[in-house]
Each structure stands twice: as structure tokens, then as C-alpha cells.
Amino acid sequence: MTITHRLELRDIDIRLDGKPLVELNAHIGPGEVLTVMGPSGSGKSTLLAYLAGFLAPTFRAGGQVLLDSRDISALPAERRGIGLLFQDPLLFPHLSVAGNLRFGMPRATADKAARVEKALENIGLAGFGDRDPATLSGGQKARVALMRLLLSTPCAVLLDEPFSKLDTHLRHEMRQLVFDRLREAGLPSLLVTHDREDAEDAGGRVIELSH
Ligand SMILES: Nc1ncnc2c1ncn2[C@@H]1O[C@H](COP(=O)(O)OP(=O)(O)OP(=O)(O)O)[C@@H](O)[C@H]1O
């Protein structure tokens, strides 16, 4: 049985120099992707930083971030249960591909090696466990970053332009993989993008932030 999660953003109000930057109410159900678009400077990255727990102290923020009805907005980033996927895969260069996949797994995870093998098969990279991440292609790195995220068993996911550095032909494939896996895992997700096709493939609601 898949465990499902819900993310609720209640009366989020982020201010910069006393002026409102982001005001938002949203409910993201299990397996749902909410896409956030808007012009440069409208506060998309700031919103993600707030939700993830690393907002710069120059901002003032209020409101509640409820994950499965629990307010996580005062918790430090590492205790929020939120997974992140960025434009760059950010694989650890000192760890092998398998080491990267093992990195975020909860300590008590049983059969780590078997899970890593299964994860590699799942993304078409069986036998790549011992490889140095630097030897992978951009698309392969992106797939490893996705699997590392899922193996860390987050309760919600934030995606910041995760496809923008991929070649056009890989972008579509990667979008399908990411959105399918997030849906299967029942994870509520928030996607920040400039790309309308990302929003269409995400298949959920789209909100626009304005200046
Ligand atoms: N650490 C910071 N201190 C002060 N102001 C900041 C800081 N980071 C961002 N800003 C300002 O906050 C506003 C929102 O920036 P943010 O990066 O969230 O926009 P964005 O919508 O993600 O833009 P882009 O699409 O270009 O990535 C901008 O006016 C920016 O200059």
C-alpha cells in the first residue's frame, strides 16, 4: 500500500522590505503537482526556500505550512520531510552512483544494497552502481538525482526548474519519469518553472505569481 501525503499552504505571506512579495493559499493532494509560474523576480525561488526551510533572514514570512496536517513552518530544513530537485542534479562527487543513492536512505532501511540495485534497474542504469557520477551523461545524472530523492522517502517534493538544463529530446522523457514516479509515490509536489510544457505535462493546477 502506498502511503500518501498532503501539503497545505495556509495564508502564506512573504514580505521583502515590508512589501508583500508572495501571498498564497493552496492545497496539494497526494500525487498532485502544483505548478508555480510567474515573471523573474516574482518570488518563485523565495517561496521554495520558505517551504524548504532556508529563507534568507532579509525576508519576513508568515502563515502555516501543513504537511499531513502538522505545521512544519518552524522546523529546521532537515526535519521537514521535504525533498528537493533542482536544475542541477547535484550528485556528490566523492561518492559512487550507489553511494549517492544510499546517502539519503533512512538509517533503518532494510536491504539497502538490494534497493539500490532495484532503483538502478528502475531508471535503466543497472550495473552503474560503482561508477563515478562525473562519468554519467546529463540525463543519467538527472535520473540518479530523482531516485536518490525518492529513496530518501520524503513526504512532499519541491522542484525548481528540474528540466531546464536537459536537451529537448531528454526533457520530455524526464518529465514523464519524474511525474509518473511522484504520482506513484503519492507525493504532493510543487513545481517552479518558466516552461509551459512542464506545466502541461505536470497535469495539475497552475498558479501565477505576479510582481
Ligand atoms: N537573499 C535575498 N535578499 C534580498 N532580496 C532577495 C534575496 N533573494 C532574492 N531577493 C529578491 O526577492 C525577489 C524575488 O526573487 P526570487 O529569486 O524569489 O524570484 P524568482 O521568481 O524565483 O525569479 P527567477 O524567475 O529569475 O528565478 C527579487 O526582487 C529578488 O531580487
Image (cartoon, rainbow, N blue to C red):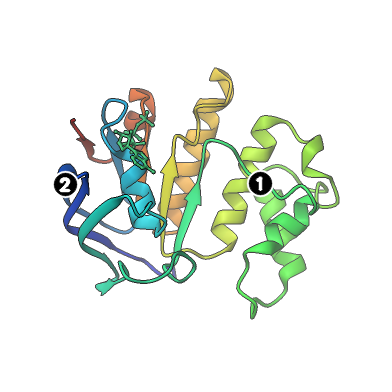
Secondary structure at badge 1 equals: helix
Q: Would you identify the image quadrant in which residue 3 lies?
A: bottom left
What count of labels does the image hold?
2
Q: Are marks 2 and 1 in contact (CB under 8 Å)?
A: no
Q: Which residue is mark 1?
A: 144
Q: Residue at x 52, y 35 (%)?
A: 87
Labels 2, 1: front one: 2
Q: Residue at x 50, y 27 (%)?
A: 164
The percent coordinates of residue 113 (x first, y second) are: 77, 67
Q: Nearer the viewer, residue 76 or 25?
A: 76
Q: Residue at x 65, y 49 (%)?
A: 122
Q: Which residue is mark 2?
A: 18
* Residue placed furthest toward the right: 130
Q: Would you identify the image quadrant in which residue 102 lies?
A: bottom right
On the rendered structure, is 42 left or right of 163?
Answer: left
The percent coordinates of residue 5 (x first, y second) are: 34, 65
Secondary structure at badge 2 equals: loop
